[in-house]
Every structure is written in structure tokens, then in C-alpha cells.
Image: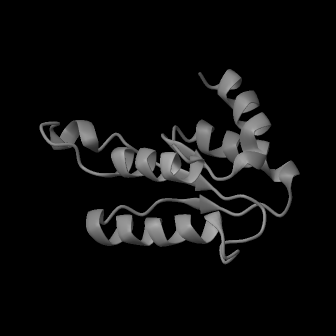
Amino acid sequence: MHPVLRLAAAAALVLSPVAGVPAVAQSYIAPAVVYSTGGKADKSINESVVRGLRRVAFVTQVQVPELVPNSEADFVPMLRNFATQDRSPIIAVGGLQVAAVTQVAKEFP
């Protein structure tokens, strides 16, 4: 499966209400997004995620916190910030974040 489709499928699964799961259990989902470099209007994957989050907010009334890095050096601190807030899932947009996600995941299993 294409990585963008995999991300979209995972986000849709995690962010949508699950049939048969009590509302109380669903309320523990606290997603957050760290975009890739390039800004939200990059005419690429970041912009696609923005559109998806707007739809999620409209349908579920859930506001998802977002952070936009200025450089790749911002990935680890931003991911760590959401992890310390017990945000889950944390959506790391783009392949540039693989090393940062790997590092932070070790700190917050």
C-alpha cells in the first residue's frame, strides 16, 4: 500500500468512531499532528493532512493539536512535547520524521 494511503487509512481508523466501542473508551483517543517541513500549504502531503483534519473536526467535533516545524531539528522536541501530554496517536507526517519517531518512541513506549 502506498505510504500516503497507509497514513490516511490509519488516521481514518483511529480518528473515526468505532462501532461497538463505548463512547467512554473512544474519548481516550487524543490525536496530535506534527507536520513535515514545508508548511501546511505545501501542495503535498501536509496540505492533504490539513484537509483531512478539517473533515475530522467537522464530523467528530474533535480539534486535533498541530505543530509545524521550521526545520528537521524541530521534529524530536515537537513529538516529545505531544508524548509528554499523553497525546495518542501522534501523527508524524512524512518520511523525514522516521529517525525522530524512532527516537521518541523509545522514550515513550
Q: Position of residue 10 (x, y in %)?
A: 44, 44
Which quadrant does the C terminus fall into?
A: top right
In the image, is 13 to the left or to the right of 82? left
Residue at the far left in the pictured view: 20
Q: What is the image's colouring?
A: one colour
At horizontal 37% and vertical 43% (from top left) the residue drawn is 29
Q: Position of residue 49 (x, y in %)?
A: 54, 64
**Residue depicted at x 68% and y 43%:** 79
**How many marks overall?**
0
What residue occupies the far front of the structure in this picture? Answer: 1
Q: Quadrant of residue 62?
A: bottom left
Residue 33 is situated, as x and y percent measured from the top left of the image, at 58, 54
The image quadrant that residue 90 belongs to is: top right
Q: Which sits in the foreground, 58 or 93?
A: 93
Asked if residue 60 is positioned above or below residue 29 in the image, the reply reads: below
Horizontal relation, residue 66 to residue 6: left or right: right
Observer-nearest of 85 and 2: 2
Q: In the picture, residue 106 is in which quadrant?
A: top right
Residue drawn at 45 percent across, 66 percent down: 52
Q: Which is nearer the eye, 13 or 79?
A: 13
- Asked whether, in this view, residue 51 is left or right of residue 79, the answer is left
